[in-house]
Every structure is written in structure tokens, then in C-alpha cells.
Image: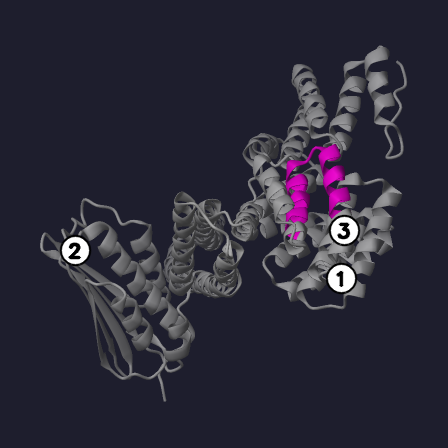
């Protein structure tokens, strides 16, 4: 049997490919080489990694090698993840999972759970991501594999970093750093330093500290020749200089990162790097190049909604500065559509994640109760016929106790359900309110100010130049379109988070809202004391959604909004004279479902009455001691 060289990190992969093609190998030797090639190419050349993985999978299935079949399925899934094709990646991982989980191979199992977690992380399903990382961590802790455990801790820190929970992220990064130093894991240590450099941007750390972390990471990745991680660290260093307005230093670093990412062939990293160059060009006032880079990002097949949203914002602002109102309006519309999609996906993903967590805990409670019953029946069988009467009596007593415990468990399960739904929805509402407030401020103060500045400068550009009649008409049309864009921008920013709601409360903000709608009347009764911000925002958003539903769907001629505030309760009613709908035959849309979830989060009651003469929606909320005014 010929000896096959084992691949190492320093070995040339091309030489191993030569071994695969020039030597006469057994199937086992060929499978091992294909495994090495598919694994090590996944961070260098995804297409070649997938190709070698599929060749190995075909050979493993042909030789009925179950272990290597699962290994190649996992390798191919990870390669598709590296290429950003998450659906296909999950398909291969799902095929590998039942084989790997039944085998006593902790490395394969932890690699599988890490792969699942990485995909869920990219899909913004953070609860599922952390759950899979923790599965891997539990196995690695048992095995004492500190190098891989450090990498998992670093990944968990990354999820908390995305969720802007920097305190918890730093806890896991500190654990990962200690384990990486102990295991002399340069790649792991470099990943931690890259993350710490990025976190420093949002915790107002000194720029020297962020730069030092990024440069340490780059040095470590150069030593290990890890080109993928090196590209991420290089992008982070460029972003540090960009965030501190050092564009002259940031731009060549970003361009270098673009070149490296393209050479690696990873669309996601390429899109990130090109987006960064677009941002730098914009802040340097080079709007033409900013537009060129932004359009290049859109041409890349990326599923990251955050990148798409940022690019549309750049195009909107850059075209505004370039005096192209038509394109400004076009990309503003795309930007707003992306914002709506982002808000809806975040809201639904948060609810879905909490529902999965609740269902898992509910099943565990039921399984525990069933196991206790089964133990009881086994014990009664062992007791024997000699003490049958005593055993039956004892069994009856134990059965009653088990029933009582089961009822208590079901009540506890219901309580957990209510608490988890409340926490999930309130957390989502908090995040939605914070995001709306931030976006409204950015739109009004940032983009709104830029559009106003452009409007002021356009007449000066015209100057004393003599224009043809048709050019005058076009110039006036452009000014009109710019006015419309400014008004639309202010309207969107106001409806996302009205300033009057934050300053003066529900009565003033709702009065302003209804006054802007010719067919809407607003009536307020009772106490005008302020309520907690969360409750006021919830009431305002519900009424806003109900009025918009009446305008869009009911074809109403008149809408009546009524708000009643008392010492221990608050209620509101939205009534229209539109065409109504049949609640039994027409399912609730996304708007009504979101309203019902918001009301449930505050333990309120929602009633809907609809007929051919119109629709009335009534909501009542009991105020807790913390929510009542003094």
C-alpha cells in the first residue's frame, strides 16, 4: 500500500492535488485526501472546496463509509455557508446531523453545531445561534478541548456583540482570550482582538486602543497565513480610522481589503469592503465614486439586509448632492422599503425565537411528569402480589399526587408562556421604539438637512445665467421634486417617532396626527397625566396602525378616534363608517396581529366589531401601580 502524505497548514495544497492525480491510491486514501482538500479550501476557494467535497461524498457513499459520508456532507454545508448560500448549507447539514449525532465523535458533533450556529447568526436568529454554540461548548468542556472551546466562546461573544449587549460579549471574549493564550491558538487570539477592536468603536474607547487590537490581529493572521481572518481584521482597522474621520488612512486599507476579498472569492466579505469604500468616498465629498462603489455592492449577490440598507442610504444622499432628484427619490423609496422589511423581519424573528424556546421548555416539563409516572408504575409492579391491596392504595395516593403535580406543572407552563411572550414582545417593542427614534432622528437631522441645503444651493448655482424656457421649466420641476422629497422625508420621520409624543404625550401627538387627516376626528376624555414611555408609544402605534387600516382598506368617509384616560385604566376606540369585513371569513393581516400582540404584552383586552356600516376597534388597558400617575 502506498503511503499518502498528511496535509499540514504549511503544505502546498497543489502538491496534494498532484498526489491525488498521479499516484495509484486505494479508495480509503483517496477519501482522506479529498477530505483534507475540501476542508482546507473552504477558507481559500469555496468553489474548489465544494467540488472536492462532492467528489469525496460520491466515493464515500459508493464504499458505504458512513462516517466519511457524514463528514463530506458537513464539509459541503460549511463551504456553502462560507459562500453565503445558507439554504443549501442547511440542507447538507440536516443530512449529516442524524449520522453524526449517533456516532461517538465529539469533534464532528461540535463542528456540526458550530456550523448551524454560524448560519443562524447570519440569519439574525440569535437565540437559536447561542443555543447551538452552547451545545458545542458543553461537549468541549467535557472533553477538555480548550482550543475549540475558546473559539466557541468567541463566537458566542460575537452574537452578543451583534445584539449590542457589549457587557455580555466582553465576558465571553475574556474567556476566549484566556483559552487562546493557554492553547497558543494564534487564529483564536486574533479573532478576539478583531472583535475587541470593533467593540471599542461603540464604547468610545481611545482610537489608539482599537488600532492596537486590530494591528495585533493582523500580525497574528499573517503568521498563520489565514487569509480570510486577515481580511476581516484589515476591514476592521480601516473601519476604525473611518469612524475617527481619518479618511486618508482608511481608504487605502479599505481598497486593500476589497482586493483581498475579491481574490478569496467571498461575496459577503467583498460586499462589506466595497460598502466601506463607498462610505469613505461619500464623507470625502467624492460623490461620483461613492455612487460607483455603492452600485458595485448592489451587483454582488448578498443577502445581508444591513449592507443593502446602508448602500441605499449612500445612493440617496450622494445623488442629492449631485443634483439628481429623480435618482434621489428612487433610492429613497428603496431605502424606506428596506427599513420596513428590516423592522418586520426583526419583529417576527424575535417572536419566533421566543416561541421555540418556550415550546422546548414546555416539552421538558411534560417529559419530566411522564418519567415520574413511569417510575411509579415500575415500582408498583415490583411490589408483588403479596401486598397487592396496600400497593393499590399506595398507588392511588401517588397517582393523585402525580396528577396534582402535573396540574401544577401545566399551570407553571402556562405562566412561563405568558411571561416569555410578555418579555419577547416588550423586548421587541423596546427595540422597535429605539430603532424608530434613531432612524427618525437620522432622517430628519441628517438627510433632511442635506436636502434642505441642496435646495438652498440650487438657485445659487443658477445665478444670473440665462436659461431657455424649457430649462427653466425643468429647473422649477427639479425644485418641486426636491420640495416633495423634503416633505415626504419629514412626514416619514414624524410618523416613525413623533417628537410631540416624546415631549407632550398622547393627547397632543394624537391630536396632531388626526389633524393631518381630513376625515379623522379626535376626542380626549379624562386625566391628562403622562404615562410611561413604553405604554404611550404602544397606544400611539396601535391607533396609528388602526387609522391607516381604515384609510387603506375600509374606504371610509369618516374616522372617529377616542381616548379615555382614568386613574387606573386607559382605553381607546377607532371607529370608521367604511365597508367593514367578516371576522369569520377574513383572516387578520399583519397589522392587526401586531396590534393584538402589543395589547397582549400589556395584558390588555381588544374587541373588534365590524359590519356593512363600518368597523369599531376598542382596546382597554388596566394600569399597574408602576404605570399610574401620582
- Residue at the spot x=27%, y=50% of the render? 588
In the image, residue 144 lies at what x, y percent? 78, 50
* Nearer-N-terminus badge (3/2): 3
- Mark 1, residues whose alpha carbon is within 10 Å: few (<14), some, or many (≥20)? some
* Nearer-N-terminus badge (1/2): 1
Give the camera-side residue of 124 and 24.
124
Q: Are marks 1 and 3 in contact (CB under 8 Å)?
A: no
Q: Is residue 174 above or below residue 512?
A: above
Residue at numbered disc 2:
556
Element carrying mark 1: helix
Quadrant of the image occupied by residue 113 = top right
Residue at numbered disc 1:
174
- Mark 3, residues whose alpha carbon is within 10 Å: few (<14), some, or many (≥20)? many
Q: CA distance from mark 1 to mark 3?
A: 12 Å
Answer left or right for 344 relative to 584: right
- Residue at the spot x=33%, y=72% of the render? 509
Element carrying mark 3: helix
Q: Tell me, yes or no, whether the highlighted magenta stretch contains residue 255.
A: yes
Residue at numbered disc 3:
191
- Mark 3, mark 2: which one is toward the viewer? 2
In the image, residue 378 lies at what x, y percent? 48, 48
Q: Is residue 297 above or below residue 571?
A: above
Per the rendered image, the range of residues in magenta is 253-279
Q: CA distance from mark 3 to mark 2?
A: 58 Å
Q: Tell me, yes or no, whether the highlighted magenta stretch contains residue 257.
A: yes
- Residue at the spot x=81%, y=64% of the render? 208
Dividing the image into 4 quarters, which one contains the C terminus?
bottom left
- Mark 1, mark 2: which one is toward the viewer? 2
Amino acid at each position: 500500500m502506498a503511503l499518502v502524505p498528511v496535509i499540514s497548514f504549511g503544505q502546498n495544497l497543489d502538491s496534494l492535488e498532484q498526489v491525488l492525480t498521479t499516484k495509484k491510491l486505494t479508495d480509503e486514501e483517496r477519501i482522506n485526501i479529498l477530505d483534507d482538500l475540501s476542508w482546507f479550501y473552504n477558507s481559500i476557494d469555496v468553489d474548489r472546496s465544494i467540488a472536492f467535497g462532492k467528489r469525496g461524498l460520491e466515493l464515500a457513499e459508493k464504499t458505504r463509509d458512513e462516517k466519511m459520508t457524514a463528514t463530506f456532507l458537513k464539509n459541503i454545508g460549511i463551504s456553502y455557508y462560507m459562500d453565503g448560500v445558507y439554504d443549501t448549507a442547511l440542507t447538507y447539514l440536516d443530512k449529516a446531523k442524524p449520522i453524526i449525532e449517533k456516532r461517538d465523535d465529539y469533534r464532528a458533533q461540535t463542528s456540526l453545531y458550530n456550523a448551524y450556529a454560524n448560519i443562524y447568526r447570519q440569519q439574525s436568529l440569535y437565540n437559536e445561534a447561542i443555543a447551538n454554540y452552547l451545545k458545542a461548548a458543553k461537549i468541549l468542556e467535557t472533553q477538555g478541548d480548550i482550543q475549540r472551546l475558546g473559539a466557541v466562546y468567541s463566537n458566542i461573544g460575537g452574537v452578543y456583540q451583534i445584539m449590542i449587549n457589549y457587557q455580555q460579549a466582553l465576558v465571553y471574549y475574556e474567556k476566549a482570550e484566556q483559552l487562546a493564550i493557554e492553547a497558543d491558538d494564534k487564529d483564536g487570539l486574533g479573532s478576539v482582538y478583531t472583535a475587541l477592536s470593533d467593540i471599542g468603536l461603540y464604547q468610545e474607547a481611545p482610537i489608539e486602543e482599537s488600532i492596537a487590537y486590530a494591528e495585533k490581529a493582523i500580525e497574528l493572521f499573517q503568521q498563520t497565513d489565514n487569509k480570510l481572518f486577515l481580511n476581516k481584521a484589515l476591514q476592521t482597522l480601516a473601519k476604525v480610522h473611518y469612524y475617527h474621520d481619518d479618511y486618508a488612512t482608511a481608504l487605502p486599507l479599505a481598497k486593500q481589503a476589497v482586493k483581498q476579498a475579491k481574490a478569496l472569492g467571498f461575496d459577503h466579505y467583498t460586499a462589506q469592503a466595497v460598502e466601506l469604500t463607498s462610505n469613505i468616498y461619500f464623507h470625502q465629498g467624492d460623490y461620483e465614486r461613492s455612487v460607483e462603489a455603492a452600485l458595485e455592492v448592489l451587483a454582488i449577490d448578498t443577502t445581508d439586509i444591513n449592507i443593502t440598507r446602508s448602500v441605499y442610504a449612500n445612493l440617496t444622499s450622494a445623488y442629492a448632492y449631485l443634483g439628481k432628484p429623480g435618482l434621489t427619490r428612487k433610492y429613497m423609496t428603496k431605502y424606506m422599503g428596506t427599513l420596513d422589511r428590516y423592522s418586520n423581519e426583526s419583529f417576527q424573528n424575535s417572536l419566533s425565537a421566543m416561541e421555540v424556546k418556550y415550546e422546548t421548555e414546555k416539552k421538558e416539563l411534560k417529559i419530566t411528569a411522564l418519567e415520574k409516572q413511569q417510575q411509579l408504575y415500575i415500582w408498583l409492579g415490583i411490589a408483588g402480589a403479596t401486598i397487592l391491596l396496600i400497593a393499590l392504595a399506595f398507588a392511588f395516593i401517588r397517582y393523585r399526587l402525580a396528577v396534582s403535580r402535573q396540574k401544577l406543572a401545566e399551570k407553571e407552563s402556562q405562566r412561563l408562556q405568558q411571561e416569555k411572550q410578555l418579555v419577547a414582545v416588550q423586548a421587541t417593542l423596546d427595540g422597535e421604539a429605539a430603532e424608530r427614534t434613531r432612524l427618525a432622528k437620522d432622517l430628519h437631522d441628517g438627510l433632511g438637512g442635506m436636502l434642505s441645503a441642496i435646495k438652498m444651493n440650487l438657485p445659487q448655482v443658477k445665478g444670473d445665467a440665462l436659461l431657455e424656457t424649457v430649462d427653466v421649466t425643468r429647473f422649477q420641476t427639479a425644485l418641486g421634486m426636491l420640495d416633495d422629497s423634503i416633505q415626504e422625508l419629514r412626514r416619514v420621520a414624524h410618523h416613525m417617532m413623533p417628537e410631540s409624543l416624546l415631549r407632550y404625550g398622547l393627547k397632543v401627538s394624537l391630536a396632531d396626527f388626526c389633524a393631518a387627516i381630513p376625515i379623522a376626528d379626535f376626542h380626549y376624555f379624562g386625566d391628562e397625566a403622562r404615562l410611561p414611555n413604553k405604554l404611550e408609544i404602544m397606544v400611539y402605534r396601535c391607533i396609528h396602525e388602526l387609522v391607516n387600516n381604515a384609510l387603506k382598506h375600509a374606504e371610509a368617509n369618516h374616522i372617529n378616534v377616542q381616548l379615555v384616560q382614568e386613574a387606573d385604566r386607559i382605553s381607546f376606540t377607532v371607529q370608521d363608517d367604511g365597508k367593514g369585513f367578516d371576522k369569520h371569513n377574513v383572516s387578520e393581516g399583519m397589522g392587526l396581529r401586531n396590534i393584538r400582540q402589543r395589547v397582549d404584552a400589556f395584558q390588555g383586552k381588544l374587541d373588534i366589531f365590524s359590519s356593512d356600516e363600518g368597523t369599531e376597534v376598542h382596546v382597554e388597558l388596566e394600569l399597574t401601580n408602576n404605570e399610574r400617575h401620582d
